């Protein structure tokens, strides 16, 4: 799913005037030369943008009639990229109900400010981009919002038994209202009933592939890995049937029924773009989605198992580590298949990249606040209680622990604090950076 962006090149009535980076103006009188100049600017725009957007065909407008005729094409777009080369009234764009990114050249905001400088403070959905980086970031935010609105979350193990990890479930109606997500409850018995329906040959073939791809297999037997593959296929089938593209699972209830832990199945789901949360922690899941949609990669979710105020090193540990933390388009990291909590089942230890900048966050249960901090990975080790423990050097662990909104936190590669702040602001969530 890509956000569709419609580039509108505003040439204006006095076509042929082009602002230079030094503040002067270049006048091009010849019509063919003007067309060539516009084509060069359009080409530069497309070459410089790195965002995951589908840029629709450019349209050049010179007057209000051109804009009126263009409105029909806007129905195909999720957002407008208005590239202002000239000056003309553009107020009719506000009636289209689409977000607007206004741009008038690299580090030349004058024409964008002429056209939208006043309105952006009184109308939502108008951004003035100073450069191609600003355009990329804004498109990523719009893309993240679209993905949130298109997310359907399967809640495995809901409705809950008398005692359940679902007790910290956020208000689902509030989540729908703020983020646009939908929920689909799936009882554990539905998952249990699906397991015998899985083709055994398919599960064995998948298990063999996982073993071949692993750097090493320490404790798990062939049967253990096949059980994990069967569970992965069962979860995938139910997600497809429910048209869900994210999930949270009450895995404690699952293991209480002596079923295999879902850890490695969830690792593979995360690698495929299905954000998946352990222990029925929907607040952590929503955080993973916000971070992952901006970063275009999966998130690690873990317990805060250590916080050293002398070194400002934060330790986060869990059993479900994506192998594609660097991004869905990047090659997977090496992994070793291990058992779950030193006992049974299958999980994986994944060696993450030392020195890698990361963003760490958690959304409050009532979705009024999100806590954010930036860190640098300084250690990644294979541990037993939870299989992978990462250490990140942050600014102030003492302040972090005092302000933490819960135990589980989401981690993604890259510094996305600024982007998450902007996304949170658009969603009506207060972002606090530590």
Image (tube, helix red, strand yellow):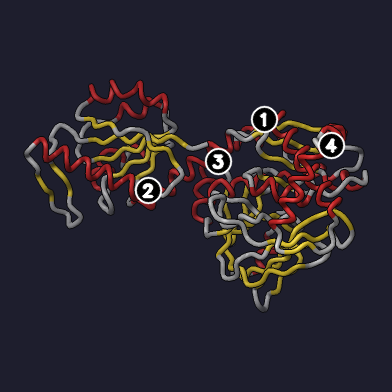
From the viewer's perspective, is 37 left or right of 265? Answer: left
Q: From mark 2 to mark 4, how far is it between C-alphas?
A: 45 Å
Q: Which residue is mark 1?
A: 243
From the viewer's perspective, is 222 left or right of 354? Answer: right
Q: Which residue is mark 4?
A: 195
For marks 4 and 1, the one nearer the N-term is 4
- Residue count near mark 4 (Cα–Cα under 10 Å), binned few <14, some 14–19, many ≥20: some
For marks 3 and 1, the one nearer the N-term is 1
- In the image, residue 61 above or below residue 336: above
For marks 3 and 4, the one nearer the N-term is 4
Q: From mark 2 to mark 1, how far is it between C-alphas?
A: 32 Å
Q: Which mark is residue 427?
A: 3
Q: Which residue is mark 2?
A: 49
Q: What residue is drawn where x is 79% and y is 33%?
A: 186
Q: Position of residue 150 (x, y in %)?
A: 59, 33
Which is in the foreground here, disc 3 or disc 2? 2
Q: Position of residue 2 (x, y in %)?
A: 49, 37
Q: What residue is drawn where x is 10% and y is 35%?
A: 31
- Residue count near mark 3 (Cα–Cα under 10 Å), binned few <14, some 14–19, many ≥20: some
For marks 3 and 2, the one nearer the N-term is 2
From the viewer's perspective, is 10 left or right of 272? Answer: left
């Amino acid at each position: 799913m890509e956000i569709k962006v419609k580039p509108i090149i505003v040439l204006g009535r006095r076509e042929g005037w082009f602002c230079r980076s030094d503040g002067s103006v270049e006048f091009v009188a010849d019509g063919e030369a003007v067309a060539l100049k516009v084509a060069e600017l359009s080409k530069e725009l497309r070459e410089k943008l790195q965002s995951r957007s589908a840029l629709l065909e450019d349209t050049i407008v010179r007057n209000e009639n051109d804009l009126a005729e263009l409105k029909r094409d806007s129905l195909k777009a999720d957002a407008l990229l208005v590239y202002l080369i000239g000056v003309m009234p553009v107020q009719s764009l506000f009636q289209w109900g689409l977000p607007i990114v206004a741009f008038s050249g690299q580090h030349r905001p004058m024409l964008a400010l002429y056209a939208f400088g006043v309105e952006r403070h009184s109308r939502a959905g108008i951004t003035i981009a100073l450069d191609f980086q600003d355009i990329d970031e804004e498109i990523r935010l719009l893309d993240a919002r679209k993905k949130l609105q298109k997310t359907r979350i399967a809640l495995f193990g809901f409705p809950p038994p008398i005692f359940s990890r679902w007790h910290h479930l956020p208000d689902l109606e509030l989540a729908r209202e703020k983020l646009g997500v939908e929920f689909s409850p799936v009882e554990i018995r539905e998952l249990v009933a699906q397991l015998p329906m899985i083709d055994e040959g398919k599960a064995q073939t998948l298990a063999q592939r996982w073993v071949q791809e692993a750097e090493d297999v320490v404790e798990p037997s062939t049967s253990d890995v096949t059980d994990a593959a069967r569970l992965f296929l069962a979860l995938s089938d139910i997600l497809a049937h429910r048209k869900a593209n994210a999930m949270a699972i009450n895995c404690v209830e699952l293991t209480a029924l002596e079923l295999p832990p879902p850890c490695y199945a969830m690792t593979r789901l995360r690698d495929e773009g299905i954000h998946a949360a352990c222990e029925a922690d929907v607040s952590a899941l929503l955080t993973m989605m916000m971070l992952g949609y901006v970063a275009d990669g999966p998130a690690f979710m873990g317990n805060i198992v250590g916080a050293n105020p002398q070194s400002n090193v934060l330790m986060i540990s869990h059993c479900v580590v994506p192998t594609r933390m660097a991004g869905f388009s990047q090659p997977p990291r090496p992994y070793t298949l291990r058992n779950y909590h030193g006992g049974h089942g299958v999980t994986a230890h994944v060696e993450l990249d030392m020195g890698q900048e990361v963003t760490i966050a958690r959304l409050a249960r009532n979705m009024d606040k999100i806590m954010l901090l930036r860190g640098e990975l300084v250690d990644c080790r294979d541990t037993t209680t939870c299989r992978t423990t990462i250490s990140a050097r942050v600014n102030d662990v003492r302040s972090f622990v005092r302000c933490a909104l819960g135990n589980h936190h989401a981690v993604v590669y890259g510094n996305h604090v600024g982007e998450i702040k902007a996304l949170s602001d658009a969603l009506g969530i207060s972002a606090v950076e530590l």
